[in-house]
Image (cartoon, grey):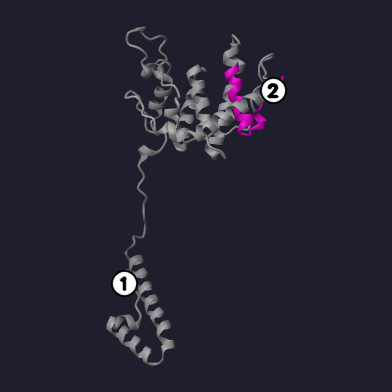
């Protein structure tokens, strides 16, 4: 048999006229023979079309992959270690942790209930949300050029007003309500990656809280890994805090608390003081 030439039955080679003639003969032999024979003809035609299409397929098919769509960081490092304990005297009480979980739960419920309302609100003309895959764009959008570029200070001109491109946009409900889960996870990954090499800032803390509030349960594996990485990084920064800034340690405690107790990563939880 020559490859690419469809296999045909004797009835098929005689042409469609022969098939119709055979069908009429079968019909004269009794009504019961008509339906099975019609099915046989349909099956023959279907098989023939399948063989013809299969013969047209190439032996090897190569997928066309755009390398630009692949993320730069493909290596995933998974650590099973827990969080480092809080500095002496700064471990949160169990009651405080329970209260933060209750407050966070109320925020999530309100966000989900009024999401359509906030999503319908018009954004100011200067609010241009980056595309989901624009890592640098989201870092600048959330943290501002001052923090992202590590500029010590910006010119202070009260007449100009607030330039959010320089100081970063706050996580307004009208903004985060427009973010789907893929974007929430991507932005969370970008900020955690930035936090892995930089210090903790109030701008970062506000966005991390907002993104956690938008994260749907049950968690996808990627989100599960990200929030555990976030909690461990918070515990590391908390230990390295030299001045023991109570406000900053409280913010770090809050993130560890939400990851461990709201998202059920109990092995990362702080032991109550």
Look at 57% across and 34% down and name the residue there: 78
Q: Which is more toward the observer, 223 or 124?
A: 124
Taking the image as shown, residue 127 lies to the left or right of residue 95, namely left
Q: Is residue 246 visible?
A: yes
Where is the N terminus found, in terms of image quarters?
A: bottom left
Q: Is residue 235 visible?
A: no
* Residue at the bottom extreme, as displayed: 29
Q: Which is more toward the observer, 197 or 26?
A: 26
Q: Badge 2, how many Cα within 10 Å: few under 14, some, many 20+?
A: few
Q: Main secondary structure of the magenta part?
A: helix
**In which quarter of the view is residue 149 placed?**
top left
Taking the image as shown, residue 204 lies to the left or right of residue 29, namely right
Q: Earlier in the sequence, mark 2 or mark 1?
A: 1
Look at 67% across and 18% down and name the residue there: 91
Magenta residue span: 250-273
In reply to whether residue 66 is colored magenta, the answer given is no
Where is the C terminus found, in terms of image quarters?
A: top right
The percent coordinates of residue 140 (x first, y second) are 39, 22
Residue 181, numbered circle: none
Pointer 1: what residue? 5
84 up-or-down from 267: above or below: above
Mark 2 element type: helix
* Mark 2 vs mark 1, CA separation in Å: 78 Å
The percent coordinates of residue 71 (x first, y second) are 42, 35
In reply to whether residue 267 is colored magenta, the answer given is yes
Residue 95, numbered circle: 2
Of tags 2 and 1, the one toward the viewer is 2
**In which quarter of the view is residue 174 placed?**
top left
The percent coordinates of residue 244 (x first, y second) are 61, 11
């Amino acid at each position: 048999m020559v490859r690419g030439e469809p296999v045909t039955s004797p009835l098929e080679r005689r042409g469609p006229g022969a098939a119709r003639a055979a069908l009429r003969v079968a019909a004269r032999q009794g009504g019961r023979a008509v339906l099975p024979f019609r099915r046989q003809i349909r099956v023959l035609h279907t098989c023939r079309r399948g063989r013809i299409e299969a013969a047209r397929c190439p032996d090897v098919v190569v997928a066309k992959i755009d390398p630009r769509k692949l993320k730069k960081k493909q290596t995933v490092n998974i650590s099973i270690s827990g969080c480092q304990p809080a500095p002496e005297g700064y471990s949160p009480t169990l009651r405080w942790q329970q209260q933060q979980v209750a407050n966070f739960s109320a925020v999530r419920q309100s966000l989900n209930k009024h999401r359509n309302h906030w999503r319908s609100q018009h954004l100011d003309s200067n609010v241009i949300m980056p595309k989901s895959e624009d890592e640098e764009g989201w870092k600048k959008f959330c943290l501002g050029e001052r923090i992202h570029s590590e500029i010590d200070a910006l010119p202070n001109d009260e007449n100009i007003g607030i330039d959010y491109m320089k100081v970063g946009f706050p996580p307004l409900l009208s903004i985060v309500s427009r973010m789907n889960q893929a974007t929430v996870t991507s932005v969370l990954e970008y900020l955690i990656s930035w936090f892995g090499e930089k210090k903790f800032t109030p701008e970062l803390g506000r966005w991390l809280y907002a993104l956690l509030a938008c994260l749907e349960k049950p968690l996808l594996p990627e989100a599960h890994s990200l929030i555990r990485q976030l909690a461990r990084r918070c515990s590391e920064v908390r230990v390295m805090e030299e001045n023991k800034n109570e406000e900053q340690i409280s913010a770090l405690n809050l993130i560890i608390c939400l990851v461990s107790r709201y998202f059920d990563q109990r092995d990362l939880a702080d032991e109550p003081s």
